Image: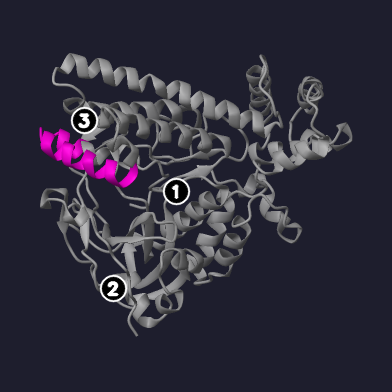
Amino acid sequence: MTVHFPFQNTYAALPDGFFARVAPTPVASPRLIKLNRPLAQHLGLDPDWLDSPEGTEILAGQRIPDGAEPIAMAYAGHQFGHFVPQLGDGRAILLGEVIDADGVRRDIQLKGSGPTPFSRRGDGRAALGPVLREYIVSEAMAALGIPTTRSLAAVVTGENVMRETALPGAVLTRVASSHIRVGTFQYFAARGDTEGVRRLADHVIARHYPQAASAMRPYHALLEGVIARQAELVARWLLVGFIHGVMNTDNTSISGETIDYGPCAFMDAYDPAMVFSSIDEQGRYAYANQPRIALWNLTRLAECLLPLLADAQDKAIEQAQAILGEFAEKFTAAYQAGLRDKIGLFTTRDGDEALVQDLLDAMAKNQADFTLTFRHLGEAALGADNDHEVQQLFADPAAYDEWAVRWRARIGDEPQAATARRTAMRAVNPAFIPRNHRIEEVIQAAVTRDDFAPLEKLLTVLSRPYEDQPALSEYAEAPEPHQRVLQTFCGT
């Protein structure tokens, strides 16, 4: 039996300075623990083949499929504001690219597949816990409709990796529109390699922003396109209470997808200053800081592109600043439109922004659960008789009651029926998110008992986040105080 990947590789055709050619390192005894069969089919792969012993060997890095050109990509990056001129794929190897059922080119990458020239003394491996976290959260994000990398498979290696303690090793097969980052551009710019920046920009335009190729100023259009996608992406993060945790420039995707799920988390109680990442000691990447950091990262991209924007640096800077100035407007428009949808407004009026902000302020002051407040607000849209579920989320229910009077006056000015408003609100306010304590339950079951039934159950729930699923309603509930997970950790 042969597992066929219809590779059509373009990144590996770039000059050698863009990557290092390196094969995955074999592991002791790979075992497939999760295969994303619908995604496999969408990629033109046979899931039954992938589920075979030979397929498992490929997903573990034991065997190189025909047509693969394994590479570790080079990139640099600002990590917590400090520039590192060479990072690169230290534990990930890109096997190649395929064209999916929608005609989109997709990378297939093994994460945790052994050391590369960019490993910087690391072991190049991944522990099972972080692999499961990325699998769960990336697939949840996809179901929520948020641009993201995807998870095709998870394999345990039969070997331990050393972190604070010995942990089961695993390999994640990650799928992305590409793995090109802001840090990829920084890698060449830091070396004064303008031709490398140009070559990379041309590749990105051809792959992700083809409309920019016919623009009067293609590199300006490229920057505008990346800014627009990042503004939309971060707005959508905030609208579901997501905190990335490590918004370094090397974790900022040029394609506009969420990438690199390390110490990420979804908020339970709403708190704009919330931080989960154990390594974010100063709160640089706190929930409410994410738009500001996105703009900071995009400014670093603009710096790399300056030689392509204009011959004179002062003119290039002026043009870059004008394009960067569009971020705030694009983010605010996407975020405010999303918030209006979340509280059931069909029209836009003066005072709407303040109305939503007052709700958020009351939620923060009263430790109200972010996801459940908006979900239950859909029921409250049917009438005040349905306010109870929202009220009980607030430490002081009167804080909600005072706001609800103004909200009902506002929605009362619109002609839509209450049932239509409820339906619209349910379509944007999920009932189920990958709550931290549920993810930890899955990880503990897998690591300590080799039990993957909780993983399957959680993935099933999260695949339909906007449906009620009464039989699984406990997965929608906020954690009890003793269940709260307040810190998440990077996989390295």
- Residue at disc 3, secondary structure: helix
> Residue type at mark 2?
Val
C-alpha span from label 1 to label 2: 28 Å
Does label 3 or label 1 sit earlier along the sequence? 1
Q: Quadrant of residue 102?
A: bottom left
Residue 470 among those drawn in magenta: no
Q: Which residues are magenta?
A: 186-209
Residue at image mark 1: 148
Q: In percent of the image, x 26 and y 75: which residue is there?
A: 63
Does label 3 or label 2 sit earlier along the sequence? 2
Question: Who is closer to the viewer here, 384 or 388?
Answer: 384
- CB contact under 8 Å: marks 3 and 1: no
Eyeballing the image, is 221 above or below 144? above
> From the viewer's perspective, is the residue at label 1 or at label 2 nearer?
1
> Residue type at mark 1?
Thr
Residue at image mark 2: 27
